[in-house]
Image (cartoon, rainbow, N blue to C red):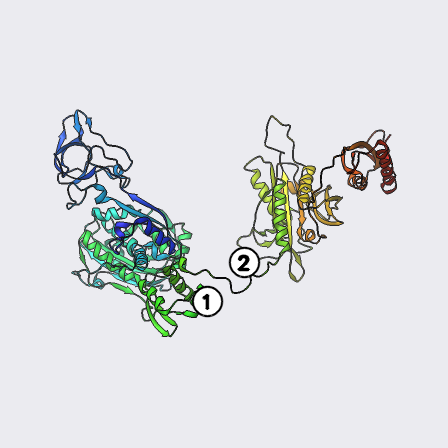
Amino acid sequence: MQIPLSWLREYVDVDLPPHELAHRLTMAGVEVGEVTELGGWENCCVGEVLEVTPHPNADSLQLCRVNPGAGAEMEVVCGAPNVAVGQRKYALPGTHSGKHETLKAARIRGVVSEGMICSELELGLGDAHEGIVVLPDDAPLGMPLDDYLGDTILDLEITPNRLDCFSILGVAHEIGALTGKKVRVPESSYSEGGPPITEEANVSVADPDLCHRYTASLIQGLKIGPSPQWLQDRLTKAGLRPISNVVDVTNYVMLEFNQPLHAFDLDKMRDKTVIVRRAAPGETLETLDGAPRELNTEVLVIADSRDPIGLGGVIGGANSEIGANTTSVLLESATFNSYNNRRTADTFRLHTDASQRFEKGLRPELAPIALRRATQLIQQVAGGTIAQGIYDIYPDADIPKPKVSLTLRRLKQILGMDVTLEQVEDVFHSLEFETERTGDSSLAVAVPYWRSDVNIEEDLIEEVVRIIGYDNVPTTMLSTPIPHQQSAPMTELRWRVKESLATAGLQETISYPLVSLEDLEKVNYSAEEAMPLRVANPMSTESDYLRPTLLASLLNTLSYNEGHNEGPFRFFEQGRAFLPRPNQLPDEREVATGVVSGLRSEPSWLVDNGPLDFYDVKGMLSSALAYLGLTPSWETATAEEGPALHPGRSARIMCSGSQIGILGELHPTVLERFDLTHRPVTVFEIYLDNLLALPARSGRNFRSLTRYPSANRDVALVVGDDVPAGKVQEILNRHRLVDRVELFDVYAGENLEPGTKSLAFHVYFQAADRTLTAEEVSRTLEGLLRTLQRDVGATLRE
């Protein structure tokens, strides 16, 4: 919201410097984002055009004799079509325009131009450049333009609850309360010389639940044309584009009082009738933006005796638009249902200045006040005769306005400070709230029409502390000890798992916990065994069941991303899976699920790139679990454990004898169902509940580096093909002198007995207190070979 200081000063005396005023407003809760100084027109002054003659060497240019107000008359070359004798506006050589360009005297088509008569664009006041800016006749000759047109703009960043600060008067009331100044509300009196309005137009409200108050006035015999310069200047400085005198007045009063208004051409309205009603099925309306709108029965329209002529509180219709030939205007000022207004604006994706105000909830008392002010200004700028009386349809007029109660006990409870009843009354009087004492320490407060955000006792307390000043609230110690932190092991584990997977190179995704049964069937989930829980009111047919697995959502994410880039794709999601239970609510399990596919890195001729496979993901998970202080082991998984996985290419993830997850390649039929092109796709699931149930872990421990060298041996062992390499590696690692073991070769084929395989390991021996001898290493290795022979039937390969 842009607030010109010159406009603000019309309603309240502002004697604070702009930046200090901005600080005071911000500290009171009305944030000023920026203070902009409008001006910088050095050596630019108000001049008068005395004579206009054709340029001798150019048909499109004219020679203007200008009186600068001080000094000798000057000759200026001007190409503006609207320049005329008597107009006031001028720039001398040396002027800096709105674009900070220096003006110099120059020869134009053989004639020296000693200055410039400026347009809006050249002064930085707007985008118009077709003609010059014409100042009022009473603009003082010779006055610097900085003094005459210069201004300061406060750019407010208003929170949605402070609807009153979307208006100049609303901000004036804030400044008045903060500085103790009296606010001057403009008069709205006018003479009514026309016939009674009821004889010239018919107005009715068919749906008062959507239109709480509807007021209208009538001006006849007016003339549509450009607005006076003062009106155009104020709208431009506030960020709006001038259109015509009648439309500009409606925008002006909206900015002034915060009440949107709309002007209808009465002669274009069938039977000169207005009916505020719900739209009929199948009705359409072409709005002022030129777009045809198909309406439904939940949309409130302003209609004539047959057709809609506007969307209530949003935008008018093209069939009743004010045009150059308009002579009779029916002016509307109403209060619409905020919820319905918001829904209508959202339905048509048509958020206007009016709808943004109505959807926040305006008070009905504001409608006739703004109507009379706008009627007065339209007569002032467009002439015409005002009909006698106004339409004011207000079914709730007799309902007394509720007052809000406030007690000092509650105020102290909220603020933690003592405030006297007299101080509270002073605050409310400065805000122009009416108060009535209902006890020694309580008040009943009547909220003025411009403050629709104050409805409960806590709102009143907020007003008190805002005006007193947040910085005046005393700092005191807490009356009770700070409670001890309650640990939340699952919450902490969730964050650690996220960090570990991200550190391992995976990217987190987030999806809805609702899926379709079709997607669950794609991952071979059998609903016959356990039907997932269906939502009673699903948002769509694609989101109607609580997911028993996160895999379907992740594969949809992978399929979408494959259509937009080549990868690599490394996704994971952490959330809840809802495992169905018969005749009960589902069992909620915390899981982390991931999918990995594509090339190991982006295509490059520098590296021999291959697809990410099972072993890449196994390495990622080993790294992630090591980050959590865990050392996993791997066991062959059955088809029932991973119905979406490829048989024989899946493994249980084990830790301390418990299964904490599953890892495997996706089954080819599942790949086809999701239209996945990159092969293979490796997926994993980590069960956080099982992870949390593991014995307490000390995490990663520091181990000092030894000063003694290591010795290594390469060992090739022949074992049965059903013996996991991890089992052999675990046995080798048991000995205290073995530092680490690395598998570097697996072989099966010629020279080996059927049903066997060869495993080759690097075995590193090291002691922390001495250098190992060859005899110690050989003796240790022989003991390990005997253990392997006993436990897994391993023999040394010849």
Q: Nearer the viewer, mark 2 or mark 1?
A: 1
Above or below 288: residue 367: below
Q: Is residue 714 left or right of residue 263?
A: right
Q: Which quarter of the figure has residue 693?
A: bottom right
Residue at screen point 30% across, 44% down: 37
Q: Which quarter of the figure has residue 94?
A: top left
Q: Position of residue 633 (x, y in %)?
A: 74, 44
Residue farthest along the top direction in this orientation: 110
**In-front residue for pair 313/480:** 480
* Amino acid type for the residue under numbered disc 1: Gln
Q: Is residue 345 left or right of residue 51?
A: right
Q: Position of residue 396 (x, y in %)?
A: 34, 68
Above or below 244: residue 118: above
**In-front residue for pair 669/370:** 370
**In-front residue for pair 661/523:** 661
Residue 303 visible, this angle: no
Give the structural element (helix, strand or loop) at label 2: loop
Q: Earlier in the sequence, mark 2 or mark 1?
A: 1
Label 2 Cα neighbours within 10 Å, binned few <14 / some 14-19 / many ≥20? few
Give the structural element (helix, strand or loop) at label 1: helix
Labels 2 and 1 touching (C-beta < 8 A): no
Mark 2 lies on residue: 537
Q: Position of residue 249 (x, y in %)?
A: 25, 52
* Amino acid type for the residue under numbered disc 2: Asn
Q: Position of residue 589 (x, y in %)?
A: 65, 54
Mark 1 lies on residue: 413
Residue 190 visible, this angle: yes
